[in-house]
């Protein structure tokens, strides 16, 4: 794990995911409004993010927090695995808070919202997989008239490797969703969808001789899409002004239909992303 990069005076609005066991402590701190230190939550440092970092660390409760001293910037472990450090803007990294105030809970984050996030993100993963399957079928269909016995190893092998990995991601996410646990499902589908987009983007770039593959390009794009989705589901439109860029079509309020996102319009897969209604709790 990399060391924190540098001290950063953060003037942006910050949010912190807090696990359920620590929620009562956070609630007391919010009521008093008193300055707090991370150790009061049993932590070396409290991880906080802007809206752009929300998809990386989904948990049971979400809180608005304010840093009382310069923060330490650190990339998420997941970003380190998929991207170069120079690709990741400060707004998408986590802020390590030592001293802060907890202002209030974000009441828009509910089990129902988490389920909608799972369903929408799983739908996008499904679209990525279907496109890869379509490309693979084109390769197979195009080989029908060839002399397969004399064919060299086809350069399209990468297409089939991509399909295999996407199927594995889809299967892993299906198991998480079938278990009915919203938080693990939300984390799993968010990561799987981002990795799928990264793999697909690299494959697409490799197929174009005039465009080099940019490591992390698809991954970051997917996580930014998820950040906008979470913002549109959790916050009212007025709460978002100035917090996250995007047109009203990209970032709608809770009153706006989530179907403004193209991959949701396409429809959710009947098996992946559905969590039983009896399990809509943390």
Image (spheres, rainbow, N blue to C red):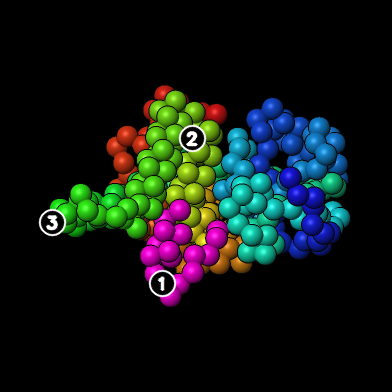
* Residue lying at 45% horizontally and 53% vertically, measured from the top left: 199
Side of 193 relative to 24 (left or right): left
Q: Is residue 97 visible?
A: yes
Q: Which corner quadrant of the image does residue 93 belong to?
A: bottom right
Q: Is residue 210 magenta?
A: yes
- Which quarter shows the C terminus? top right
Q: Nearer the viewer, mark 2 or mark 1?
A: 1
Q: Which residue is mark 1?
A: 209
Side of 10 relative to 280 (left or right): right
- Of pointers 3 and 1, the one earlier in the residue sequence: 3
The magenta region covers: 199-216
Please state which of residues 173 and 142 is positioned toward the viewer in this rendering. Answer: 142
Q: Residue furthest front?
A: 150
* Residue lying at 64% horizontally and 60% vertically, measured from the top left: 84
Q: Is residue 147 magenta?
A: no
Q: Residues within 10 Å of mark 3 (few under 14, many from 20)?
A: few
Q: Residue 206's x, y, as percent?
A: 43, 64
Q: Residue 61's x, y, as percent?
A: 62, 38
Q: Nearer the viewer, mark 3 or mark 1?
A: 3
Q: Which residue is mark 2?
A: 185
- Of pointers 2 and 3, the one earlier in the residue sequence: 3
* Residue lying at 85% horizontally and 47% vertically, measured from the top left: 99
- Residue 17 position (above or below residue 140): above
Q: CA distance from mark 3 to mark 1?
A: 26 Å
Q: Which residue is mark 3?
A: 145
Please state which of residues 27 and 125 is positioned toward the viewer in this rendering. Answer: 125
**SS state under label 3:** loop
Q: Residue 183's x, y, as percent?
A: 54, 34
**SS state under label 1:** loop
**SS state under label 2:** helix
């Amino acid at each position: 794990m990399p060391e924190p990069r540098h001290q950063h005076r953060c003037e942006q609005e910050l949010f912190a995911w807090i696990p359920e066991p620590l929620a009562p402590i956070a609630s007391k701190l919010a009521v008093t409004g008193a300055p707090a230190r991370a150790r009061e939550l049993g932590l070396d440092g409290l991880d906080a993010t802007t809206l752009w970092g929300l998809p990386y660390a989904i948990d049971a409760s979400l809180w608005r927090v304010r840093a009382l001293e310069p923060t330490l910037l650190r990339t998420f472990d997941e970003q380190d695995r998929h991207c170069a450090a120079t690709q990741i803007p400060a707004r998408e990294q986590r802020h390590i808070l030592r001293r802060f105030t907890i202002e209030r809970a974000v009441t828009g984050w509910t089990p129902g919202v988490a389920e909608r996030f799972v369903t929408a993100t799983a739908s996008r993963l499904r679209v990525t997989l279907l496109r890869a399957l379509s490309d693979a079928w084109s390769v197979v269909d195009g080989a029908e008239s060839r002399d397969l016995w004399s064919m060299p190893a086809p350069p399209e092998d990468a297409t089939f490797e991509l399909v295999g990995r996407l199927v594995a991601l889809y299967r892993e996410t299906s198991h998480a969703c079938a278990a009915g646990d919203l938080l693990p499902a939300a984390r799993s589908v968010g990561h799987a969808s981002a990795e799928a987009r990264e793999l697909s983007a690299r494959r697409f770039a490799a197929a174009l001789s005039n465009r080099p593959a940019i490591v992390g390009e698809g991954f970051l794009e997917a996580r930014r899409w998820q950040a906008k989705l979470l913002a549109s589901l959790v916050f009212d439109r007025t709460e978002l002004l100035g917090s996250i860029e995007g047109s009203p079509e990209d970032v709608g309020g809770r009153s706006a239909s989530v179907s403004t996102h193209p991959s949701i319009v396409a429809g959710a897969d009947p098996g992946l992303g559905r969590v039983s209604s009896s399990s809509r709790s943390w």
